[in-house]
């Protein structure tokens, strides 16, 4: 997309693989795009991945398999989370009681150039 003042802006729509073991491939592919980006860049989508225990509510294990790979990708690409308001969790497993799981899976990340547009 071409912004009238800032030139090209890059949008990447993301769907993280439902299988944890396959998500690293998605993050690696995202990182590979960086060499072609020269301007504001935003990733928006369903990442299917929490970044920390704070993004998950569950009565069972609070472990976050796969989070380290997404953290590595964010560090390598210098992307930062776009802060959301009001909605803490974007997904639930449609169960009740102790089986209920809530997670923040839908999100957006931006690069530093995006902050200056």
Image (spheres, rainbow, N blue to C red):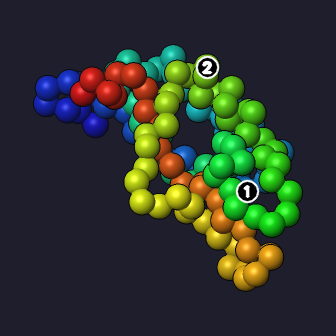
Say few, some or many: other residues with alpha carbon within 10 Å of mark 1 (under 14 / 14 to 19 / 20 or more). few
Camera-nearest residue between 75 and 56: 56
Would residue 31 be seen by someone viewing this image from the given angle?
no
Q: How many marks?
A: 2
Tell me if mark 2 has few (under 14), some (14-19) or many (20+) residues whose alpha carbon lies within 10 angstroms of its own.
Answer: few
- Residue position for label 1: 18
Q: Which residue is mark 2?
A: 76
Q: Earlier in the sequence, mark 2 or mark 1?
A: 1
Q: Quadrant of residue 94?
A: bottom right
Name the residue located 64 percent from the left edge and 28 percent from the top edge.
73
Residue 79 placed where, x, y %? 51, 28
**C-alpha separation, residue under disc 2 versus residue under disc 1:** 23 Å
Quarter of the picture containing the N terminus is: top left
Point 54% across, 47% down: residue: 14
Name which residue lies at 67% across and 35% down: 70
Q: Is residue 11 above or below residue 94?
A: above
Which residue is the extreme one toward the bottom?
Answer: 96
- Asked whether residue 57 is in view, the answer is yes
Determine the image quadrant of residue 96.
Answer: bottom right
Q: Would you identify the image quadrant in which residue 27 lies?
A: top right
Q: Secondary structure at mark 2?
A: helix
Q: Is residue 82 left or right of residue 72?
A: left
Q: Is residue 71 left or right of residue 77?
A: right
Q: Is residue 88 above or below residue 77?
A: below
Quarter occupied by the C terminus = top left
Specify the label residue 46 is tagged with: none
Q: Are marks 2 and 1 in contact (CB under 8 Å)?
A: no
Query: Disc 1 on helix, strand or loop?
Result: loop
Q: Residue at x 53, y 58 (%)?
A: 88
Q: Residue 55: where, in percent of width, then height? A: 64, 52
Q: Position of residue 49 (x, y in %)?
A: 68, 49
């Amino acid at each position: 997309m071409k912004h009238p003042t800032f030139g090209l802006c890059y949008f990447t729509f993301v769907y993280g693989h439902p299988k944890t073991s396959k998500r690293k491939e998605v993050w690696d592919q995202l990182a590979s795009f960086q060499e072609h980006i020269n301007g504001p860049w935003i990733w928006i989508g369903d990442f299917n991945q929490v970044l920390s225990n704070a993004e998950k509510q569950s009565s069972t294990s609070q472990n976050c398999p796969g989070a380290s790979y997404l953290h590595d990708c964010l560090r390598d690409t210098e992307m930062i989370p776009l802060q959301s308001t009001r909605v803490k969790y974007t997904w639930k497993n449609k169960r009740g009681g102790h089986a209920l799981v809530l997670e923040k899976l839908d999100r957006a990340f931006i690069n530093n150039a995006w902050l200056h547009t």
